[in-house]
Amino acid sequence: MLIRRPSDVLPSEITSRELYQGRRHFLQQGAGLALTGAAALGMPWTAAQAAALKGFMPDKSPHPDDKPTPLKDVTSYNNYYEFGVDKDEPAKNVGAFKLRPWTVTVDGLCNKPKTFGIEDLLKFAPLEERIYRMRCVEGWSMVIPWIGFQLGALLRAVEPQGSAKFVEFTTAFDSKTMPGVKYAVLDWPYKEGLRLDEAKHPLTLLALGLYGEELLAQNGAPIRLVVPWKYGFKGAKSIVHIRLVEKMPATAWNKAAPNEYGFYSNVNPAVDHPRWSQATERRIGEFSKRKTLPFNGYSEVASLYSGMDLKKFF
Ligand code: MTE
């Protein structure tokens, strides 16, 4: 994102919703995960994990007509700087990154801090599928069928104290398996943050899968944040620590370029990034650009910011 480069994505075919729905039905029948996960995508879910996924709830997307972006684009055109700054590098460079064992520690200003194994998190809450629009500040967007659970459910389990106002997310750092961290592009480990009410909003997810299968490392496996009304960089990948804090946490992109990446980072067509217009976007797989909508079209979150000047607090 700090590095300017022309788009190198070729427009590609869009998966039709009918095709995807048919496939999702197949997965819900219980046949799909172990087979497709193992065969096509490397590491499969365990039987218990697949069983948990079978229970995922129907699509609750506020925009059910959005067509999911083809899986190959979702998994090969990525920003994950720990594995390289080019869009194709994460998929190529994640091979040595270990996804198990994995724990996420949730602590800070809460009554019941706890370290959760990834298996505990899978059982934690009913997994849901949410087809969300994702928009990158660089001007491209995708529609991704995530599988995850509400971050709010996890936060409720640790009982935030009254003094907790923000949530800080810290992601994995491993110089042995992440070739990108030898470059000081960002202040590692990657950190992001949300205000507590944003974190508790029902649209905010911790995702464990996409397209009916376990997340691939390049998309933030085994667990990542998804906040559909904010620019993509808020979606911290491969989270290891969630901390409830009183003060607004420092975040990786804001530290790197505070004039370019604010803390809030709500999708706002009226506030241009210094290098990229935010008025329009190109959805991967489409030729023409479309207008970018305030809050990425998720207007139900607007009340979280009533009274705030969103040009100043970008
Ligand atoms: N998380 C970590 N740990 N490292 C990163 O470099 N990049 C962010 C975000 N999460 C990033 C990260 C950016 S800039 C974007 S646009 C999204 O991940 C991209 O998510 P995707 O590749 O799954 O589309």
Image (cartoon, helix red, strand yellow):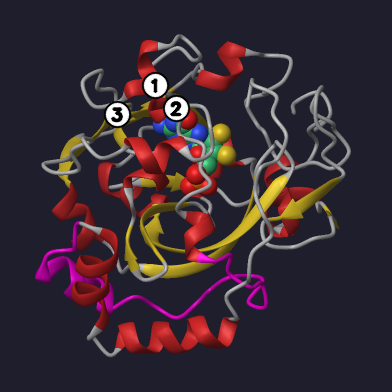
Q: Nearer the viewer, mark 2 or mark 3?
A: 2
- Viewer-proximal residue among 9 and 216: 9
* Residue type beneath disc 2: Gly
Among the two numbered marks 3 and 1 on one chain, the one whose residue lies closer to the N terminus = 3
- At mark 3, the secondary structure is loop
- At mark 1, the secondary structure is helix
Residue highlighted by disc 2: 84
Q: Main secondary structure of the magenta part?
A: loop
Q: Residues within 10 Å of mark 1 (few under 14, many from 20)?
A: many
Image quarter where the C terminus lies is: top right
Do the residues under discs 1 and 2 have CB atoms within 8 angstroms?
A: yes
Q: Residues within 10 Å of mark 3 (few under 14, many from 20)?
A: many
Q: Which residues are magenta?
A: 43-70
- Viewer-proximal residue among 262 and 279: 279
Does the beta carbon of the residue at mark 3 sit less than 8 Å from ligand 1? yes
Q: Is residue 263 magenta?
A: no
- At mark 2, the secondary structure is loop
- Calculate the distance from the C-alpha at mark 1 to the C-alpha at mark 2: 5 Å
Q: Residue at x 41, y 51 (%)?
A: 152
* Residue 24 drawn above or below residue 36: below
User: Residue 180 got which mark?
Assistant: 1
* Residue 59 drawn above or below residue 94: below
Location of residue 149 in the rendering, given as x and y in whole percent from the top left corner: 37, 60
Q: Residue at x 20, y 43 (%)?
A: 99
Q: Residues within 10 Å of mark 2 (few under 14, many from 20)?
A: many
Q: Is residue 226 in view from this perspective?
A: no
Residue highlighted by disc 3: 172
Among the two numbered marks 2 and 3 on one chain, the one whose residue lies closer to the N terminus = 2
- Calculate the distance from the C-alpha at mark 2 to the C-alpha at mark 3: 15 Å
Location of residue 267 in the rendering, given as x and y in whole percent from the top left corner: 73, 43
* Residue type beneath disc 1: Gly
Do the residues under discs 2 and 3 have CB atoms within 8 angstroms?
A: no
